[in-house]
Image (tube, grey):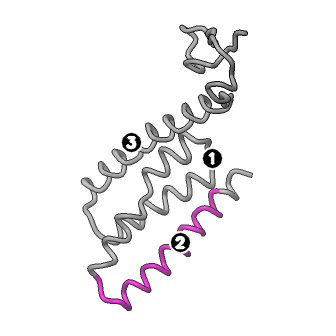
């Protein structure tokens, strides 16, 4: 019995399946959704690299600190609401562009009342930016 397993999805230069000799139960079942998930994961990772580089460029241009990070996060939230992008542009590029880790690291260095105020301003302004972008998309 021959079983076909997917290879190199969705690469057009290779055949979509190749023969696999043996009983599928002997070697385990092949998950037909694996390759599309793999490609989606790779596209998200590539997009995140692009977004992180864009964030780095803006940070180098405008400096590090609370307010540039807030502006970057608000811009990313607005674009996410405006365009509702898919995995590459949304989760990847805009996910890499916006930053929670730098936001958290910067908050460690400020007094607690300032950190709480900045956290509140960030959450409220980013949600507002997303809502504004979402409203413009309709």
Task: Report the Cα–Cα distance between label 2 and label 3.
Answer: 25 Å
- N-term mark: 1 or 3: 3
- N-term mark: 2 or 1: 1
Q: Nearer the viewer, mark 2 or mark 3?
A: 3
Instruction: Check residue 4 for magenta coloring.
Output: no
Secondary structure, mark 2, is: helix
The spot of residue 121 in percent (x, y) is: 48, 78
Task: Report the Cα–Cα distance between label 1 and label 3.
Answer: 20 Å
Secondary structure, mark 3, is: helix
Rendered-image quadrant of the N terminus: top right
Q: Which residue is mark 1?
A: 83
Which contiguous range is marked in magenta?
110-133
Q: Which residue is mark 3?
A: 49
The spot of residue 78 in percent (x, y) is: 56, 57
Q: Which residue is mark 2?
A: 125
Are dots 2 and 3 in contact, CB under 8 Å? Answer: no
Q: Camera-side residue: 63 or 22?
A: 22
Q: How packed is label 2: few (under 14 Cα within 10 Å), some, or many (20 or more)? A: some
């Amino acid at each position: 019995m021959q079983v076909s397993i997917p290879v190199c999805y969705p690469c057009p230069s290779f055949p979509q399946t190749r023969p696999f000799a043996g009983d599928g139960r002997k070697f385990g079942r092949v998950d037909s959704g694996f390759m599309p998930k793999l490609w989606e994961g790779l596209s998200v990772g590539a997009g995140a690299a692009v977004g992180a580089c864009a964030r780095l460029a803006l940070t180098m241009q405008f400096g590090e600190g609370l307010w540039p990070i807030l502006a970057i996060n608000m811009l990313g939230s607005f674009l996410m609401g405006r365009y509702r992008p898919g995995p590459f542009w949304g989760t990847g590029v805009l996910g890499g562009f916006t930053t929670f880790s730098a936001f958290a690291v910067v908050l460690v260095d400020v007094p607690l009342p300032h950190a709480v105020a900045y956290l509140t301003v960030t959450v409220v302004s980013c949600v507002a930016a997303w809502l504004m972008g979402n409203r413009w998309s309709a």
